[in-house]
Amino acid sequence: MKEFFSDMLSTIIFVALYMAIGDIYIATGVAIAIGIFQVLYLKLRGRKVDAMQWMGLALVIVFGSATLYLQDPRFVMVKPSIIHFAIGCVMMRRGWMARYLPSRAVENLSSRMVNGWGYAWAFLMFGLGISNIVIAMTYSPQIWGYFISFGAMGAKIAMFGLQYWIFKATVIRRLSTSGAAAS
């Protein structure tokens, strides 16, 4: 979660600030500054800047600058869609999820199940990206703010909870079955 939080820091601060003060332009300026500061901080500390962080910085600078220059919030509102689409494409790679699972889960879950859930996550990302574009182009920045804060995040939390529950039940069932067979 630390890496995810780091990758999404400027977006998280943007949404939180926008929801708190209701000014998309101030929130955009702060998000750009946070993104630049974060990369500079890592560079000064001699740490590697991950590709996701470079992409996030480029997106926040390009779309944030377009929002500020053109005084059109839709540019920054569409940015999460690009991130969702990029993540969705990465998640289409077979087996990507296995490296995030504990060894006990990897040993007791079929690759078919793990790959299936990986593809389900990819389709969720694509669906959220499309939904974000529709909401950003159709509704007010306030409605969009609620969607990106609660709708998109809620969908990811619900998906994670469902997957966790199913994986846990499957592992427990397999372990109890293999324990009964060993007896």
Image (cartoon, grey):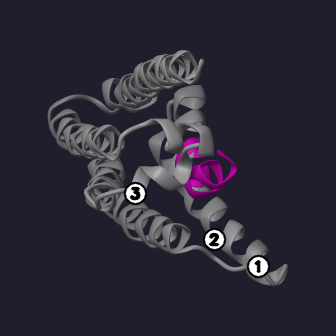
On screen, residue 143 above or below 85? above
The number of discs equals 3
Disc 1 residue type? Arg
> Which picture quadrant has residue 20?
top right
> Mark 2 and mark 3: span between their CA atoms?
29 Å
**Mark 2 or mark 3, whichever is nearer to me:** 3
Most foreground residue, 100 or 70: 100
Quarter that holds the N terminus: top right
Mark found first going from the N terminus, 3 or 1: 1
Q: Position of residue 115 (x, y in %)?
A: 30, 47
> The magenta stretch spans which residues?
1-13
Label placed on residue 96: 3
Q: Position of residue 18 (x, y in %)?
A: 52, 35
* Label 2 sits on residue: 36
* Label 1 sits on residue: 47
> Which picture quadrant has residue 33?
bottom right
On screen, residue 87 above or below 143? below
Q: Is residue 3 left or right of residue 160?
A: right
